[in-house]
Image (cartoon, helix red, strand yellow):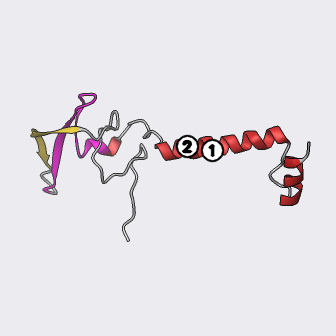
Amino acid sequence: MQTMIQCNCGRSTQVVHCPACGSVNRYPLAVKNEVDEQTGKLYRGYRCRRCGVEYNDLDRLACSAPPPPLSKTERQAIARAQGIEQFRASKGIDGTEDRKTMLQKLFSK
């Protein structure tokens, strides 16, 4: 089972993203590739197509991108939960009451 490692911004570290804006739309820069002489590891260079920042794999360790936006289903779930809470508040229903009491309050005039 593989564990998902998150970046400082909340995105997955397995997906290469811009450390400035978080965009995954990048342009590879062959001339910006660097090799670490001690370890022999290749750090690939990229340029963000959204904001134009040039970065490499090593720069991603100090990511300061804003958190990713909520997905449509996450926004819908939050709105649904807020709507339920507003409905309960308008009917005077407390979440600690039992089901019978809540139904009586709902259907009483």
Q: Residue at x 30, y 50 (%)?
A: 15
From this viewpoint, which residue is outermost toward the left? Answer: 31
Q: Position of residue 68 (x, y in %)?
A: 42, 40
Give the residue pinned by disc 1. 80
Q: Is residue 46 magenta?
A: yes
Q: Quadrant of residue 49?
A: top left
Q: Residue at x 28, y 41 (%)?
A: 24
Which label is found at residue 92? none
Q: Amino acid at mark 1?
A: Arg
Give the residue pinned by disc 2. 76
| Viewer-proximal residue among 81 and 64 | 81
Q: Along the horizontal axis of the image, is 95 left or right of 78?
A: right
Mark 1 and mark 2 residues within 8 Å of each other at the beta carbon: yes
Report the Cα–Cα distance between label 1 and label 2: 6 Å
Circle 2 SS class: helix
Q: Amino acid at mark 2?
A: Gln
| Viewer-proximal residue among 43 and 72 | 72
Q: Position of residue 8 (x, y in %)?
A: 41, 45
Residue range corresponding to the magenta coloring: 40-60
Q: Position of residue 22 (x, y in %)?
A: 34, 38
Label 1 Cα crowd, 10 Å radius (few <14 / some 14-19 / many 20+) = few
